[in-house]
Each structure stands twice: as structure tokens, then as C-alpha cells.
Image: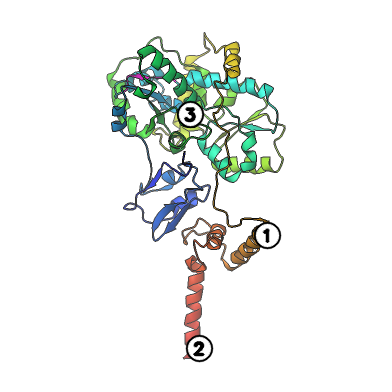
Amino acid sequence: MDQNEHTILFDAERCIGCVACSVACPTRAIRVRHSLARLKPELCIDCGACVEACAYEAARARTSSPSDLQRFRYRVAIPSLTLYAQFGRDVHPAQVLDALTRLGFESAYDLSWMSETLGQATDAWLTESRGPWPKISVTCPAIVRLIQIRYPELLPNLIPLESGRELAAKMLRRRLTAEHGLAPEDIGIFFVTPCTAIMNSILAPVGLDRSHFDGAFALNELYGPLLKAIKQGGPGDPDARISARGVMWALAGGMTAGMRNANTMTVHGMRDVQFVFDRIEAGKFQSVDFIEAWSCPDGCVSGGLTMEGRYAAQRAIQHLVKRLGEQDHPVKEEKVRAMLREHFFDLEEEIRARESRSAARDLREAIAWKKERAALLARLPRKDCAACGAPDCATLADDILRGEASLDDCVFLRIARLEGRGESEERKR
């Protein structure tokens, strides 16, 4: 699978070269050249920060279209738990699942029970695991890709268990194949995603040969039709059981809230995540068993493809959890441990570092590069204005060393040079 294939698209007709996306990108993967934003695919983690930062809708998400459904005889939707928080406090998840079946899906599958099951599996896995510590969740694909690019030394810290959504799709395809007598390829399983990162994890999965999903629809694109279907529909399946612990996974901290292990930590928002990861590399937090990490500021409820505001969505999830109350039929620990022994939760492949173009190939070149970089930075104004198209002066220096830019790209140096020429000509007169 091509790990440089991405779900972030730039519309050249809408882009005005304002550099907002370049500044917002946490991995410095965007440059603005000739008034157009351009992606450096080896650095992009598909977090969607550029999509949220763009005021002109020039950056957008690549998702599935209704025509993709026609390729399958039986179509299933698995919505993100965040979808339950988009329609106010009085709409039950059963109504949302029922509404999805009115939009072209034969059935809709709730993710909450698989989320609770994975939480217990993580608990059990931690009890038998050895270092390095702390272990880091893989639920947020933007976090996994960030580690692949910027923190490859932390790859052994990642928990090698599949995400709940992939596990749900895997199990569901097996079940539907047996129940309906269909070939696996006749069943189309689609995710309703709150972010671009999950869409990319389906297009170019990490730790899997291929995703168990066949595509994903953006939550904000389905919101209008779903709202109409909910208003026209009934109460949904009265026997539908939703896991309160599983629903909490829509929020940052929801994963660890349902775990038995209390020696955990939750970090959310890219700036705080990088702060913590920098310190893990420096040897900090080794006394922590598990870190739940999210690229979005409040977890999936604040994903870039949602409709409801993050604070209202948090309230809706918290209200739903109280409404659901304690479960009469919790996930059985012995069943989870049996599934662990059968390797049901295991990733198929080792997660490896992603190759990115380096300015140096060996230690000698690295030392020379460091000196040259320092010399370039001494010449640059260090205003980090992004007018050159790179997000800051340090990134411009790196681009110059790679032969992808020049000092002339710096507006301040150009102005200084023109002023110098003007003064020189004035003296000649």
C-alpha cells in the first residue's frame, strides 16, 4: 500500500495562496508556491488541520461517493460514535442507526460494544506486556502517522492491536457472509467518519495489508439527509443495546475511563501530544502504563468533518451515557481473553517508520548540514511570517538545503537587497 497516498486535496481554482494551511500543518507538510498550496506527501499525516484552517474551502477531504455503494450487493454503515452527538440530546442512537438504513444501506452496525471489548482487551494485553513504557494507543490514525514520521523511536511503544472500527468491520464481514450466503467481496462496509485521518487509514492502512472497510463517508456530508430521515422516522429498534462505556470513546479520556488499569494518561490536541512525545523520547513518563492520544482537541467529537460544535457534542455524549446507565450484559472478561489468545485483535503487520526525504545521508553529511543550516538561519530574519510559502524560517532553511527553495524566497531579504540597491544608486548620483 502506498503510504504517500492521501485524502487531503487542494482545489487550485479556490486556493489564493494565503499560507494559512501551511502555518496550521503540525508536520510542516505544506508549501505555498506560485500562490498555490502544495502537499509534501512524505510529511502529511492527514490530520485535517489544513482543511479546518482554510477559509476558502480550497483544502478538502477525499471521501466516498454514493456511486461507490453500487459496487456491492449488500451495503453496511458503521458510524463513528461521534455521530450520536450530532442531533441533540433527545435523539437515541437507535434512531440514528435506523436513519442510516433509509439512505441506501441494508443495515447499520453500532460500534460501541466493540469499543468496550477493545478496552478490555487493552487492559488484558497490558497486564502481560513488557516495556518499553508507556504504551500508546493506535485508535487515532493521525497519531500513528505522526509517530511514524517524527517519533520513530516510539514505534515499539504502540499497542499492536487493531482499532475498534477495523475489528468491527472484520467481524461483521465474517458474520454477514455466513448469514446471507454472500461472497465477502459482495459486501460493502462503509464508515461514517468525523475526520480525514480515518478516511486515510482506510485508503492506506497502517499495520494491515488492506482495510476491512470499502470506503468512508464524511459525517458532515451525511448530516442533512440523516437529520431529515430521523425526523421522518420512528424511534428505531426498541431492543437496540448500546454500550455506555463504548460510547465514551467519542471523547478524549473515554478509552481510559472504561479501563481497569488506572495508571493511564490522556493527551489530546496536536501541540500537547508533541509536547508529551518529546518528553517520552527524553525518558519521561516511563512510570505510566498507557497513554490515550488524540490529534483533535477533544477526541473524535472535535473532528474536522463534524457538524455539531465540540462543546455541545461533549454534552450530548455525556447525557447519552447517563441515559444508557449501567449495562445488564457487560462484555465478559473470559471471552475477551480467549479472543486475545486467538489473536483476533492483533495487527497483521509491524508498524514501521515512514521514509521521508532527509537532507543528510550519513553522520558526516548530518554534521555539515547542521552547520550550513545554522549559517542559513543566521541570514534569515527569523520572523516566521510564512510569506515565503514555508511555515517558518527553519523550514525554509531545510528547503534551501534540499534544493527546493532559495534565499530569494524570503520577502525580507528581497526588500533589504532592493533597498541596498537603491541606496547604492543614490550614492552614485
User: In the rendered structure, are the residues bearing label 1 and label 2 in contact, judged by CB atoms less than 8 Å apart?
Assistant: no
- Which span of residues is magenta-colored? 105-110
User: In the rendered structure, are the residues bearing label 3 and label 2 in contact, judged by CB atoms less than 8 Å apart?
Assistant: no
Q: Quadrant of residue 221?
A: top left
Nearest to the observer: residue 348 or residue 228 = 348
The amino acid type, in three-letter code, at marker 1 is: Arg
Q: x, y (%) of residue 167?
A: 49, 23
72 displayed left or right of 369: left
Question: How far apart in space, not on screen, are marks 1 and 3 (Cα)?
Answer: 52 Å
Q: Local crowd at mark 1 within 10 Å, few (<14), some, or many (≥20)? A: few
Residue at 48 percent of width and 35 percent of height = 205
Q: Tell me the number on the disc at residue 427.
A: 2
The amino acid type, in three-letter code, at marker 2 is: Arg
Q: Nearer the viewer, mark 1 or mark 2?
A: 1
217 displayed left or right of 49: left
Q: Quadrant of residue 174?
A: top left
Residue receiving disc 1 = 364
Question: How far apart in space, not on screen, are marks 1 and 2 (Cα)?
Answer: 46 Å
Earlier in the chain: of badge 1 and badge 3, it is 3
Residue receiving disc 3 = 314
